[in-house]
Amino acid sequence: MRNPMEERKKVLITGAAGRIGSSLRVLMKDRYRLRLMFHSKVLPVEEDEEVVIGDLCDFEEMSEACEGVDAVVHMGGLAGGGDFPGRLVPVNIVGTYNVFEAARQQGVHKVVFASTNHVTGMYEKEAVYTTPDMPVRPDSTYGVSKAAGAALARYYVDAFGMSIHCLRIARSSGEVRPKDGACDPSRRGSVRGIWPNSCGDVSSPICPSGSSTESPTTPGSTGISRTRES
């Protein structure tokens, strides 16, 4: 008899100890086989979950983490400001490059990238509602580092035909919980956004069995979307 777990797609989550990474783990564990990437903080795991300890800044470690998975959910990184060349560039820019390039070399064509509303934060300071087609206007060096990650995503889509979905996350309470197998959009603090072929449901399929999901717009394009609080 075939093991149902072996038929599920395997997804790597970077930043699995973070607020959003750990919440996604709860939402995804019944749908995918999970490989959880931790760095300085390691959480208790369940018996059927794989664990890798690694550094986004180390390409070899990132390549090993991507080996044998069907998709990557890249939630790892540093938030806030501070030392841009010494802190944000190595982790948020070089680290994101390592994720995309390691995924490419390992034949992993689907990646979800955690961006931020800070890439358009200057509009918001002027009370301007932003949409994905507007030019970026970062409000901080953190926003700059995430905008660079989205630019890398665009390059990997155009140059290599990868499918990369960039989520502009506004806020999360870290208390995202499944409700009847889905995210409850009425819960204040829930992370909501447009995932492949869905709206407002972070539990939507990343790589459903037997098919390949793409952006609702153009296949092979970056699906850039925005998340908001209820």
Image (cartoon, grey):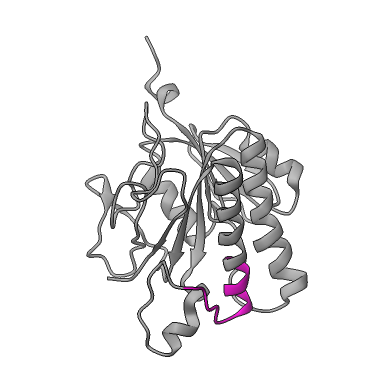
Question: Which residues fall within the magenta stretch?
Answer: 135-146
**What residue is at 46 percent from the left and 72 percent from the top?**
117
* Vertical comparison of 201 with 163: above or below: below
Work out whether residue 40 can be spotted: no
Among all residues in the image, which is located at the extreme bottom?
A: 126
Q: Position of residue 107 (x, y in %)?
A: 60, 32
In the image, is 220 to the left or to the right of 147?
left
Q: Position of residue 174 (x, y in %)?
A: 42, 63
Work out whether residue 113 can be spotted: yes
Name the image quarter holding residue 87: bottom right
Quarter of the figure with the C terminus:
bottom left
**What residue is at 68 percent from the left and 44 percent from the top?**
62
Quarter of the figure with the N terminus:
top left
Say if the magenta span includes residue 136.
yes
**What residue is at 31 percent from the left and 46 percent from the top?**
197
Q: Nearer the viewer, residue 180 or 152?
A: 152
* Vertical comparison of 158 with 124: above or below: above
